[in-house]
Image: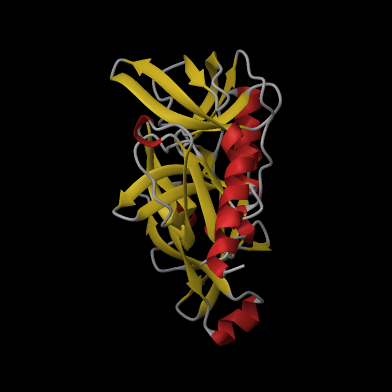
Amino acid sequence: MTELDAYSQIVTRVARTVGPHVAALAVRSRRGEGAGSAVLVDDDGLMLTNAHVVAGVTRGRVAFADGSESNFQVIGADPLSDLAVARADQADLGGIELGDADALQVGQLVVAVGNPLGLSGTVTAGVVSALGRSLPAQSGTASRLIEDVIQTDAALNPGNSGGALADANGRVVGINTAVAGVGVGLAVPINATTRRIITALRQDGRVRRAYLGLVTAPFPLPEKLAKRAKAARGLRVVDVVGGSPAQRAGLRTGDLLLDAGRSPVRDAQGLQKLLFTDAIGQPLPLTVFRNGAMVDVVAVPTELV
C-alpha cells in the first residue's frame, strides 16, 4: 500500500464516520434567506453550529445526510464565540463524538465536512496550518477576539460554516466558521472552554461572561523569567480597553501576564476559562512582569453585556 492509499483510506473512513452527522441548515431572516451546516451532537437532535448562521432567527429547516428533513429551533447563540446550539424536531441519526482541539499539532491531518455552496455532504481534507489564531467577533456593542482559532488549508466555502472539522480518528475538533482568504479556513476549537459555552447555551440559552478588557497574544518568556515563573509562555498585553476593569486595576499595554487567579496563564484559553459567571464581581488577582519586576494587581471583572 502506498502512502497515498493510506491517506485516502483515512479520509474515506473519517468521511464515513462524520458525514452522516453533518446536516444542512436553511434559515430565513430580515436579511433574506441563508444557509449553513450543523453537527449533530446527541441522540435527541441537538445540533452545534455557528452563531452567525442562525443570527436573527429562532427556527429554520434542516436536511440530514440520510435525506430526511425537519424543522429546528434555536436554543441559544453566543456571537462572541460564534457558537450556537439548536434542536431538530425530528432526527433519527445519533450524535458524533466531540474531540479535544488542545491535542492538535501543526501539520496534523484534518477533514472538513459541510454543505458549501449548497452542495451537501462535501468532504475536503488538509492539515492544521496554524493554531492560536484570533478571529474578530461582535455582539451588540461588545467586541472581542475569538482566541485559539484553528487555521486549516482544507477547502472551505460559504455554507461550510457550522460544519465539522474532524481529526484522523473521526472526532470533531472544530466547528468551521470562516474563510479568511484563498486557501485559508478557520474553525472554532472544541476544548474545555467551548464545552463550557455549549453547556451554558443548552441550559440557559446564553453565556454570561466576566469582562476584563484585555487584548492579549501568546508570548514566549525569556529563559530567566521562565524559570522564575515556572512557565515557558505567558500573555503579552496588546491593548487595555479604556475604562475597563483591567485599566482600573493598573494593567498596561506591554505587560506580560504570568498568573491569573493564582494559577499560571500560558495561553488565551487559560485566561478565558476563568471569565465565566462565577468570576463576575469577584476579585481576580493577577501577576504581570513589567520593567524587570513582578507586579501584583487585583481586578474585579464586570459582566460582559
Tell me the quarter of the image containing the N terminus.
Answer: bottom right
Q: Nearer the viewer, residue 161 or 11?
A: 11
Residue at horizontal 63 percent and vertical 25 percent from the top: 46
Tell me the quarter of the picture where residue 280 sits: top right
Answer yes or no: is residue 277 visible. Answer: yes
Q: Quadrant of the C terminus?
A: top left
Question: Residue 33: where, in percent of width, then height?
Answer: 32, 19
Q: How is the structure coloured here? A: secondary structure
Asked if one can make out residue 243 in the rendered structure from this viewpoint, the answer is no
74 lies above or below 178 = above
Q: Position of residue 79 (x, y in %)?
A: 44, 34
Residue 179 in the image: above or below residue 126? above
Q: Quadrant of residue 91?
A: top right
Name the outermost residue toward the bottom: 224
Q: How many numbered discs sit on the rendered protein?
A: 0
Between 126 and 220, the one lying in front of the other is 126
Left or right, 117 with respect to 154, comes to: left
Left or right: 236 as drawn, with respect to 261: left
Rendering coords of residue 153 (x, y %): 41, 57
Residue 142, position as x, y percentages in the image: 39, 37
Relative height, residue 57 to residue 305 (above, below): above
The relative height of residue 18 versus residue 288 in the rendered view (above or below) is above
Considering every residue shown, the one lying at the far front of the view is 1
